[in-house]
Image (spheres, rainbow, N blue to C red):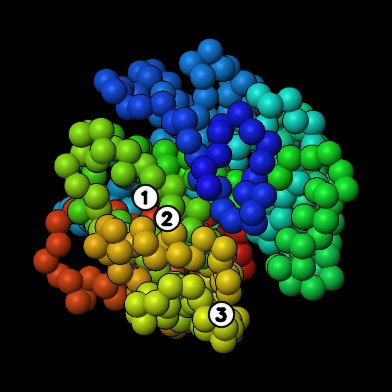
Amino acid sequence: MELDIHSYLWRCSCGGLLDLLGIPTLDNFKPVSGLWSIWRYRKSLPFDTSSNEWETVTLGEGITPLIEEEIGQYLKLDFLMPTLSFKDRGSAVLITKALELGVSRVVADSSGNAGISIAAYCSRAAIDAEVFVPANTSGKKVEQLRSYGAKVHQVTGDRQAANAAAIEYLENNNAYYASHIYNPLFHHGTKTYMYEIWEQLGGKLPDVLVLPVGNGTLLLGAYIGAKELVDSGLASRMPNFIAIQARECAPLASTWQKQTTGIAQGESRCNSTVAEGIAIADPPRANQMIEAVNASRGSFVTVSEAEIISARRLLSRRGIDVEPTAAAAYAGFLSWRKQNPETGSIVVALTGAGLKSAPSNH
Ligand SMILES: *Cc1c(COP(=O)(O)O)cnc(C)c1O
């Protein structure tokens, strides 16, 4: 089902997933010059031209560095965001829409960076945030949520229990569900990732994009962005998306390998991994993610714990400290490149900062 952008809905009444209608076309698209944030792409975002709530909400998110490590091989440093992860792209857009809709309270559920990002933007927009987290969420993250003024609900049980508690709260209270997974507005924020790379590469998309994948908020956003650029003739072809999962929790990769749809029971069993940000056993948008990777003529790659730890160390020895979830993408890139040495331009996503996790061992 597709959603009108002026709606409060976050899920189809049939229970299914929503996607957006009514995105402005990219005819004669040009970034707004002199505006150094994701809002320079606002003609492609789901807002009327007269809408100016973004000016209240923005923290200057976006325009993160794209550095060339080797010829044709780039790292996109999205951990240099206001709350230190790429999630700020999605939150800025989603919370701006909430402000425009006149929302006074939002609900979010997350065990990590998404909740922190939503909480920061809610405080910016003077919207109350109720964030549901699993009871084992680290004290550091709970403190960060509270520091932004969010009300934290610690739910007994796992990530799914936190989700169920959030939905129960929504049923009994008047609030807007700022879900980074279900609410399609989030993906229209993360799509700016692709617009930015396109502009930084001089009006071209890379041949290959390597990124970590759990719930797919970056993958699906980047896919939407690339598709919009290609469909409007601003880029000639989609990048191949190389989607990275931790071997200890790889339901998408194993479903993709079997060329089936839907994650089979048992497949969704996850062992613990240092890449906690992509340890998602049963992602609601699984089929969309697999379709996006296939449509891009890309693939899934899994990485071991040792590869992740070693990739993190390699990066930090190059002056780049990222959290293990982000290092997983770099590990996946190293492993993929061994099999595919002859490729054109490659961008590797570095999504979250090292400060968010325990330091790497030396
Ligand atoms: C959320 C997150 C991811 C994974 O994003 P998904 O939307 O779950 O695919 C990767 N890296 C970091 C740092 C994150 O915060």
Which residue is located at x 36 percent, y 58 percent?
292
Which residue is located at x 17 percent, y 71 percent?
340
Which residue bears the numbered disc 1? Answer: 223
Q: Circle 3: is it few (<14), some (14-19), or many (20+) Cα within 10 Å?
A: some
Tell me, yes or no, if residue 148 can be seen here. Answer: no
Badges 1 and 3: C-beta atoms under 8 Å apart? no
Report whether the residue tagged 2 is closer than 8 Å to ligand 1. yes
Q: Circle 2: is it few (<14), some (14-19), or many (20+) Cα within 10 Å?
A: many
Q: State the SS at label 2.
A: helix
Q: Label 2 is placed on what type of residue?
A: Leu
- Considering depth in this image, is 187 or 40 the residue closer to the camera? 187
Q: Circle 1: is it few (<14), some (14-19), or many (20+) Cα within 10 Å?
A: many
Measuring from the top left, give residue 129's x and y in whole percent: 78, 42
Mark 2 to mark 1 CA distance (whole Å):
6 Å
Q: State the SS at label 1.
A: helix
Which residue is located at x 52 percent, y 81 percent?
264
Which residue bears the numbered disc 2? Answer: 219
Residue 268's mark? 3
